[in-house]
Amino acid sequence: MDFSFTPEENSFREEVRAFMAAELPQDIRDTHFGFRRHTWEQMFRWHKIVAAKGWVAPYWPVEYGGTGWTPVQQYIFDEEAMLAGAPRLRPFGLKMIGPVLIRYGSDEQKAHFLPRILSGEDYWCQGFSEPGAGSDLASLKTRAVRDGDIYKVNGQKTWTTTGQHANWMFTLVRTDPTAEKPQQGISLLLIDMNLPGVEVRPIITIDGDHHVNEVFLNDVEVPASMLVGEENKAWTYAKFLLGNERVGIANVGQNKAELRLLRLLALKRQRNGGPLIEDPVFAAKLADLETDFMALEITNLRMLSSIKPGGDSAELAPFLKLRGSEIQQRTNELAMEAAGPRAAVWEKENSGDAVLDRYGTHGWLLSRAFTIFGGSSEVMKNIVAKQTLRL
């Protein structure tokens, strides 16, 4: 669909395509177009390549290592990277804690952490959810007690994505248990994952992989200099961070690439003596899905064209997260149908014409979580009703 991009934006798109053609390694392309998930090593290698170009954090202000791109240019880069078969740049440092530090962090925190996020030297995980505080995040119970120049932290975090790879965790903790409202009395700490008392235990999810973890904090002594902003004011910072996270979870560029892969799969699969994509029932389902995706893409571009670089996308973020995660699930469901009986084979390696974990049972099972993490769909609908529709 033609969204009438400006000549400057079209020129920028060609620049991005040239970069992808020259710099994206072939093995990373092959992983994507072979219907497989990128490995951790491939994701990290791609981060280094994009960082060397100076394009790894386009949403940051230029003075901190950003590119000065408009929001639409940022979207074009994400879209072209996904369509070329690149891995997603991991968001925890780049899109989540990095912007929070830029807006709310101390000068010392910015000077130390921001360059290390850009280079990939530090890898972050998110210490928000707890066993009793998922979508109801304000009910978190992890405590941090100030003792001179340190905070002593005790508690448990869960669903900590890629925590097994992280050396730092940005963590919501309760510093005032007597606060009148649960959203009050919460602070944001930066915790070195190598400190004594930090224990990471794997959670093996239903797809059989190790994506997430439990993190136990037992008398962890965190320097008070690792407090972000003001004590007891972190609910404001968390809302800002979650707005960025939810736009990322919408994965508009990745959704577009996944739909293109689905079309490729439907061209390869045979049904009734012809390509599956010519089957009228399947074609109708695919057209319905692609139509809903176009509506999501238009909404995303409308949002991007209305905000300035560094602006706040929080108002539409819950809607984008809600619709984007649902479309991802539907794409996986239709891909399972396209793969047919072959999709049920429980394997993670590909040989010949086998359909792999991206569109097999593994990928479908993983997609069940898309409408839960980052805020469940039920919670997103309530936020949309209150925040966007003003009901």
Image (cartoon, rainbow, N blue to C red):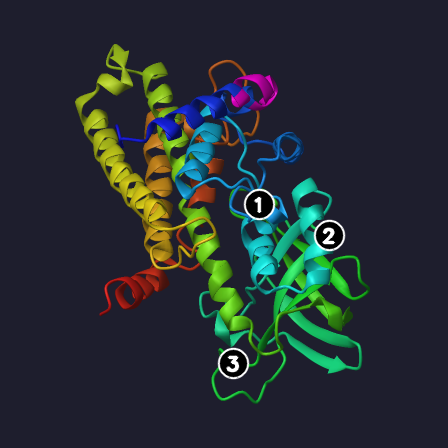
Q: Nearer the viewer, mark 1 or mark 2?
A: 1
Q: Which mark is residue 184?
A: 3
Q: Which mark is residue 62?
A: 1
Task: Using the image, determine if residue 354 lies above or below residue 303.
Answer: above
**In screen coordinates, is 172 left or right of 365?**
right
- Image quadrant assignment for residue 257: top left
Residue 261 in the image, given as x and y percentages of width and height: 39, 25
For mark 1, does the 10 Å Cα neighbourhood hold few (<14), some (14 to 19), or many (20 or more) residues? few
**Residue where numbered disc 2 is placed:** 167
Residue 199 in the image, given as x and y percentages of width and height: 74, 61
Task: Tell me the distance, in whole angstroms, between the alpha carbons under discs 1 and 3.
Answer: 33 Å
Q: Examine the residues drawn in magenta and state their main secondary structure.
A: helix
- Image quadrant assignment for residue 286: top left
Q: Amino acid at mark 1?
A: Val
From this viewpoint, which residue is outermost toward the right?
A: 196
Task: Tell me the distance, in whole angstroms, between the alpha carbons under discs 3 and 2.
Answer: 28 Å
- Contact between marks 3 and 2 (CB within 8 A): the answer is no
Q: Which residues are magenta?
A: 19-28
Magenta stretch encompasses residue 23? yes
